[in-house]
Image (cartoon, grey):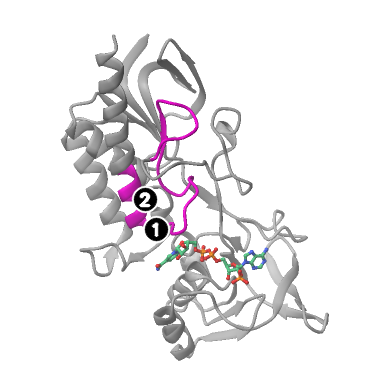
Amino acid sequence: MMHEYDTIIVGGGPAGLSAALYSSRAMLKTLVLEQAAVGGQITSTSEVENYLGSISSNAIDIVTRMKDQALEFGSEIKAEKYKSLTKKDNIFQVTTDKGYYECKSVIIATGSHSQYIGCKGEQEFTGLGVSYCATCDANFFRGLNVVVVGGGDSAVDEGIYLTKFANKVTLIHRRDELRAAKSLQERAFANPKMEFIWDSTVEEIKGDGIVKAILVRNIKTNEITELQTDGVFVFIGYKPNSDEFKEIVKLDDKGNIISDENMHTSIPGIFVAGDVRNKMLKQIITAASDGAIAAISAEKYIADLNQNH
Ligand code: NAP
């Protein structure tokens, strides 16, 4: 059976839910397609401290409030995996693993995913000691020793979180200074459970069914040392989830969907919001802002379409 919408939003993270809220409040018939859990990447973090108006809020509480707010104003949310998008006579056809939909505008809000180290053993031990989500897996490492790879906000934030569970958290960073916000750095340096290995990368993850050790290379001396560890948490940035759209809209050389400040992509009627687009600051607050702008741009686009017919 075919269903018609004004706007279909692909992705149910903060960008998608914000777009849904603004779109449904503009009385547009709105559908959010989310293949996994609503909330996107925030669901893999613990506390959120920097979303305006929420000091140290539980991430799941924030997501639940966002979802309820979008539903309250009439958005529909379906647990379906986006498959394809085509356009004919100003109508978009969207297929998912469960259905077929038509709509006048599309907002891509598919977010991003963790970047992999790409070293030997990483894939083999994923879920067996290698993790990309401290909130999900920290509990398995109570009283054990873990390493965190990366030097940005995620690595430091999640490293501090892991100290609540692990005996020791060793952060391995490829430079001799962290990229993370200074306030996070201060907390990490003051934490007696945290240690730091500078100018180093992980060359190999070794184990026997589960992670037992890693080989660490000092990039200045090239010296390789073996470090015993029970877990490896990887936080070395994110890659945009744009693969399924690369033949449809223009991307930059990092795979971000190119947009203007009003969230227009290279194709009229397709808008973008959140971490999947090219921008400097990828945060919950900027995702929410993008979503609001994308929805209002879609509203204007649909009004123009209606006027011209
Ligand atoms: P990020 O800021 O891009 O930092 C990635 C870190 O990983 C950098 O330290 C980088 O080293 C290192 N790295 C990159 N590729 C590597 C590789 N192949 N091998 C080893 N190390 C590598 O990513 P993020 O920390 O995940 O943060 C992403 C965005 O989310 C940022 O905008 C961040 O502010 C935001 N965020 C905010 C919070 C918060 O405010 N509490 C929490 C989490 C995330 P270099 O420093 O040498 O480049």
Q: Which residue is mark 1?
A: 283
Q: Which mark is residue 52?
A: none
**Residue 95 appears left or right of 67:** right
Residue 270 lies within the magenta run = yes
Vertical arrangement, residue 26 with respect to residue 55, above or below: above
Start-end of magenta stretch: 263-291
Please name whichever residue, 130 or 209, is drawn nearer the observer in this view of the structure. Answer: 130
* Residue 196 seen in the current view: yes
Q: Are marks 1 and 2 in contact (CB under 8 Å)?
A: yes
Dot 1: element: loop
Q: Quadrant of residue 222?
A: bottom right
Q: Residues within 10 Å of mark 1 (few under 14, many from 20)?
A: some
Residue 81 horizontal/vertical position (percent): 47, 30
Residue 190 horizontal/vertical position (percent): 44, 90
Is the distance from the Cβ of mark 1 to the nearest ligand 1 atom less than 8 Å?
yes
Which secondary structure dominates the residues rendered in magenta?
Answer: loop
**Residue 195 appears left or right of 9:** right
Q: Which residue is mark 2?
A: 287
